[in-house]
Image (cartoon, helix red, strand yellow):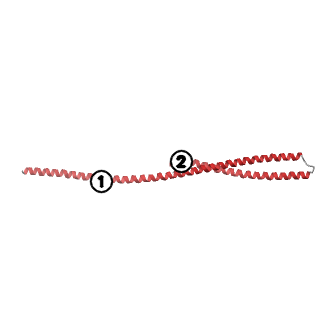
Amino acid sequence: MDQKMKFFIIGLIGFSVIFLFLFFQTVSHQQVLLRENKDLKAENATFLKKVSKLENDLKENQSKIDSLRAERDRGAEELKNLQSQLDLLSKTRDELLERLKKQASLQAAAASQQQITAPENNDAYWGQVLKSKADLEMRLSNIREELGKLQISNESLKREKSVLEIDVNSLRNERKDPLKAA
């Protein structure tokens, strides 16, 4: 019976050593898994921060794009308004030039008419000619002054139009490639 007891005790000790070995291996494996879990949680938190930052950047870029679109639309509307003003001024200038030509032709016709029908009193005739000449010169100077103002205004509108066209083109380029603009 001694031998059976020894054999049983040795078996029990061996069995205990195996279980003890398995227990330590399980504990060490559990610690490794806990460390991996902790590292993965830290990595996950880092990724969540990056995702949050990227979402904020995306929102900011979207708001920039929206404001640029609104600015582009305002610029296009202003360009249309300026173009219509330019067209109106060009039409007015053309009308004034036409009136100037008509008045010049009327003045020439009146002068030739007055030369043909010279009245008997030469002083009264020349007084009337000088009076009509002064009147026509006054009208002509007024029309020229108005034409000059319109030309200055026309040039100013052309400059504004070219500046706005440049702005619209740059906004289009920024819209096509928003990453380069940011």
Q: Secondary structure at mark 1?
A: helix
Question: What number is the disc on residue 82?
Answer: none
Residue at the image position 76 percent from the left and 47 percent from the top: 99
In-image side of 147 versus 67 (left or right): right
Secondary-structure class at tag 2: helix
Tag 1 or tag 2, which sits nearer the N-term?
A: 1
Residue 64, position in %: x, y?
52, 52
> Percent from the top left, x then y, of residue 33?
29, 52
The residue under the point 47% across, 51% down is 58
Q: Position of residue 86 (x, y in %)?
A: 67, 49
- Pointer 1 residue: 34
Q: Tell which residue pokes out farthest to the right in this image.
A: 120
Q: How many marks?
A: 2
Asked whether 92 or 58 is in front, the reply is 92
Kindly check if marks 2 and 1 are in contact, taking CB atoms under 8 A apart as contact: no
Residue at image point 71% right, 51% down: 150
* Residue sitting at x 51%, y 52%: 63
Q: Nearer the viewer, residue 36 or 95?
A: 95
43 displayed left or right of 16: right
**Residue linked to disc 2:** 175
Q: In the image, what residue type sits under mark 2?
A: Arg
Q: Residues within 10 Å of mark 1 (few under 14, many from 20)?
A: few
Q: How many C-alpha atoms fall within 10 Å of the one at disc 2: few (<14), some, or many (≥20)?
A: some
In this rendering, would 146 be left or right of 119?
left
Report the residue that reaches farthest toward the left. Answer: 1
Which amino acid does the dot numbered 1 rest on?
A: Leu
Alpha carbon separation for disc pair 2 and 1 = 50 Å
**Residue 145: x and y, percent?**
75, 53
Name the foreground residue: 37 vs 99.
99
